[in-house]
């Protein structure tokens, strides 16, 4: 997976999250809708941080710095601690439905599935075009 795909996943995550939060506000109770919204926000910010860490990691590996004392991977631990703290604080202090927080947080998985499917079908079409050009030559 390249950094462009990570960017597409991030954008799709924000778009799908916005749609889910708007739909939840219209269709669900206040606690459920707030749970979806908080889950979307936490999940989107979490994925954005993962994208930045992974992009830095990929660029360091491309330069050959990946094995020589790279510090990028060490940011994953504090990021995870922030994620756990954010979820704990949201559950503790906000009037939200925990199951809907999990649903909102899980939107990023749907973004990954959609981008993976798009990428695979795009590669299949490209491979088919390359084969057709090879046969014609």
Image (cartoon, grey):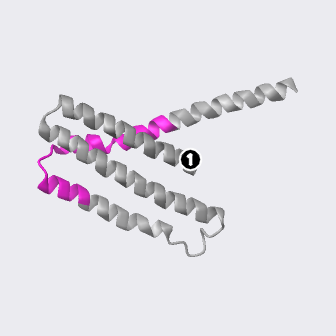
Residue 103's x, y, as percent?
A: 27, 40
Which residue appears at 60% of the width and 71% of the height?
67
SS of the residue at dot 1? helix
Q: Is residue 99 visible?
A: no
Q: Where is 111 relative to 79, above or below?
A: above
Give the image location of residue 33, x and y in percent: 19, 38
Most common secondary structure along the magenta stretch:
helix
Residue at 40% x, 37% y is 110
Q: Residues within 10 Å of mark 1 (few under 14, many from 20)?
A: few
Instruction: Judge left or right: residue 97 versus residue 50.
Output: left
On the rendered structure, is 14 left or right of 8?
left
The residue lying at 16 percent from left, 53 percent from top is 91
Residue 123 image offset from top left, x and y in percent: 63, 34
Q: Which residue is mark 1?
A: 4
- Front residue of 5 and 121: 5
The quarter of the picture where residue 19 lies is top left
The answer, for residue 133, to whether it is visible in the render is: yes
The segment highlighted magenta reads 86-115
Residue at (37, 36) in percent of width and height:
16
Asked if residue 6 lies in the magenta stretch, the reply is: no
For the C terminus, the quadrant is top right
Residue toward you, 121 or 42: 42
Q: Quadrant of residue 40?
A: top left
């Amino acid at each position: 997976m390249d950094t462009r795909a990570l960017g597409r996943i991030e954008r799709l995550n924000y778009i799908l999250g916005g749609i889910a939060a708007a739909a939840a506000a219209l269709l669900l109770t206040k606690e459920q809708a707030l749970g979806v919204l908080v889950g979307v926000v936490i999940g989107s910010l979490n994925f954005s941080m993962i994208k930045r860490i992974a992009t830095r990691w990929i660029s360091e590996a491309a330069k050959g710095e990946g094995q020589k004392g790279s510090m990028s991977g060490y940011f994953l631990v504090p990021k995870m601690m922030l994620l756990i703290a954010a979820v704990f604080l949201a559950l503790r202090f906000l009037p939200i439905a925990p199951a809907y927080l999990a649903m909102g947080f899980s939107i990023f998985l749907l973004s990954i599935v959609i981008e993976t499917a798009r990428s695979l079908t795009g590669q299949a079409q490209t491979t088919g075009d390359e084969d057709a050009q090879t046969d014609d030559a």
